């Protein structure tokens, strides 16, 4: 089976994760896909294939050299985003893309006028959706690339490599992918997540991240007699939002610029709730953003009374650069692997997080590499076949370079 057929098979599995269930994996359909992959890995000759009680799948490609070579790993996630349906995905291939609009279905068009990155892939074969679901290249492209690379190494025994571990995990899209990943059992000196986007991406910097939930406790009084008595929680919630800098939001920032992101707001006169995520690449600025959030809540309480605004805030993850700065040889290996494959490496910072972030802080240095898909989490997602092939060869080259 080639990499395209493998990917097209994988995306037929609905593996959407859920923030509501509180289980691991968060949806049973992820386990269905994991069981399929377990049997496939066995058929393809991988060893130590193990699916644990939490839905984490591990396997080994044994070394074919007697040299002392570090054990390395490749990781991808099985779930797709809750943001769009992953059920009944009907992909099709647009051969030799001509640079024009791609009609997905009636009224739904993927156009370079809105998605200019399409033009970077003119002449390539693009896998697209039918306009009703996401595609699932995030991260089934990564899984297909890893599996195909292991098969390639087995059919090319002249390529010497050490012991290689692969790990496929659930629930990355809801921030829980690394929580039950068994780093000790994985047993690698370092690893790579294949979960990036455009060809050539190497990511070893990401946001420091925190989540904040604010409850506004109001006081409901008949509006005809409300003067000096009513505390309108819904209105106070909007006032609080207005106290944060309007030019420090996701839609007004880029590159290394951090932000406050209001992810949800609901309320009545009696009670309101707000949800934020707080992001910054710089740890010092990140801490100052958290302080600013505390100050805003304190100002609301000073104005309206103690306990009107209640803040719950917790850190989610940190910038993995802290864990990789003294291990840049891991990045150098990836750069050389891409160059060998004819790819221009593109070092960039992730404006988000990745399973590799948490794994790096748990003792497994784990930068993120491209998997080739673009426009994730919606019907305009697409994946060039040639990008998947280049990602697969990057994995092969990393294994060979590490052994050399």
Image (spheres, rainbow, N blue to C red):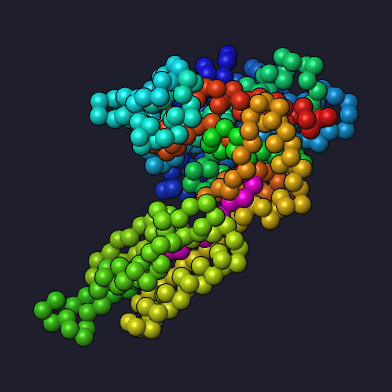
Q: Quadrant of the C terminus?
A: top right
Task: Give the main secondary structure of the magenta stretch.
Answer: strand
Q: In the drawing, does residue 7 fall left or right of residue 216?
A: right
At x 56%, y 47%, the residue is: 350
Q: In the drawing, does residue 285 fall left or right of residue 130?
A: right
Vertical side of 2 occupied by 122: above or below: below
Residue 372 locus on image (x, y percent)? 54, 31
At x 45%, y 55%, the residue is: 253
Task: Looking at the picture, tell me which residue is in the foreground, 62 or 378.
Answer: 378
Q: In the drawing, does residue 141 fall left or right of residue 335?
A: left
Quadrant in which residue 184 is drawn: top right
Q: Magenta residues?
A: 203-213
Q: In the drawing, does residue 209 fall left or right of residue 114?
A: right
Q: Is residue 58 visible?
A: no
At x 70%, y 36%, the residue is: 335
Q: Is residue 183 magenta?
A: no
Task: Looking at the picture, tell me which residue is in the foreground, 235 or 17.
Answer: 235
At x 28%, y 64%, the residue is: 267
Q: Is residue 366 visible?
A: yes
Q: Is residue 204 magenta?
A: yes
Quadrant in which residue 198 is drawn: top right
Vertical side of 356 occupied by 385: above or below: above
Task: Looking at the picture, tell me which residue is in the foreground, 386 or 5.
Answer: 386
Task: Looking at the picture, tell me which residue is in the foreground, 350 or 318.
Answer: 350
Q: Quadrant of the N terminus?
A: top right
Residue 87 locus on image (x, y percent)? 38, 30
Vertical side of 145 occupied by 306: above or below: below
Residue 209 locus on image (x, y percent)? 54, 58
């Amino acid at each position: 089976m080639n990499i395209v057929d493998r990917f097209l098979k994988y995306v037929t599995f609905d593996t959407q994760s859920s923030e509501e269930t509180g289980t691991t994996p968060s949806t049973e359909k992820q386990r269905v896909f994991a069981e399929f992959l377990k049997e496939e890995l066995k058929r393809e000759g991988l060893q130590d294939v193990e699916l644990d009680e939490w839905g984490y799948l591990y396997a080994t490609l044994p070394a074919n050299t007697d040299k002392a070579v570090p054990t390395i790993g490749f990781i991808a996630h099985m779930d797709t985003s809750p943001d769009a349906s992953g059920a009944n995905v009907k992909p099709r291939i647009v051969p030799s893309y001509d640079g024009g609009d791609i009609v997905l279905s009636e009224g739904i068009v993927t156009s370079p006028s809105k998605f200019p990155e399409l033009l970077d892939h003119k002449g390539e074969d693009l896998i697209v959706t039918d306009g009703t679901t996401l595609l699932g290249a995030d991260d089934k492209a990564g899984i297909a690339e890893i599996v195909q690379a292991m098969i390639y190494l087995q059919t090319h025994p002249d390529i010497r490599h050490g012991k290689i571990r692969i790990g496929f995990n659930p629930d990355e899209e809801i921030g829980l992918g690394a929580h039950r990943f068994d780093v000790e059992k994985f047993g690698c000196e370092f690893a790579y997540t294949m979960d990036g986007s455009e060809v050539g991406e190497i990511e070893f910097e990401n946001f420091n991240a925190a989540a904040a939930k604010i409850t506004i406790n109001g006081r409901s009084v008949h509006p005809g007699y409300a003067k000096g008595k009513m505390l309108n929680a819904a209105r106070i919630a909007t006032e609080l939002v207005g106290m944060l800098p309007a030019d420090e939001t996701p839609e007004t920032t880029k590159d290394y610029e951090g932000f406050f992101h209001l992810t949800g707001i609901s309320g009545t006169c009696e009670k309101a709730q707000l949800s934020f995520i707080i992001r910054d690449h710089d740890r010092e600025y990140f801490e100052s953003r958290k302080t600013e959030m505390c100050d805003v809540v304190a100002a609301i309480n000073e104005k309206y009374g103690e306990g009107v605004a209640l803040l719950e805030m917790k850190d989610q993850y940190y910038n993995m650069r802290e864990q990789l700065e003294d291990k840049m040889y891991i990045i150098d290996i990836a750069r050389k692997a891409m160059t060998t494959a004819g790819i221009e490496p593109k070092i960039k910072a992730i404006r988000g997080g990745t399973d590799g972030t948490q794994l790096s802080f748990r003792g497994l240095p784990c930068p993120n590499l491209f998997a080739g898909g673009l426009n994730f989490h919606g019907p305009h997602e697409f994946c060039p076949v040639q990008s998947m092939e280049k990602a697969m060869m990057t994995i092969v080259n990393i294994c060979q370079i590490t052994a050399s």
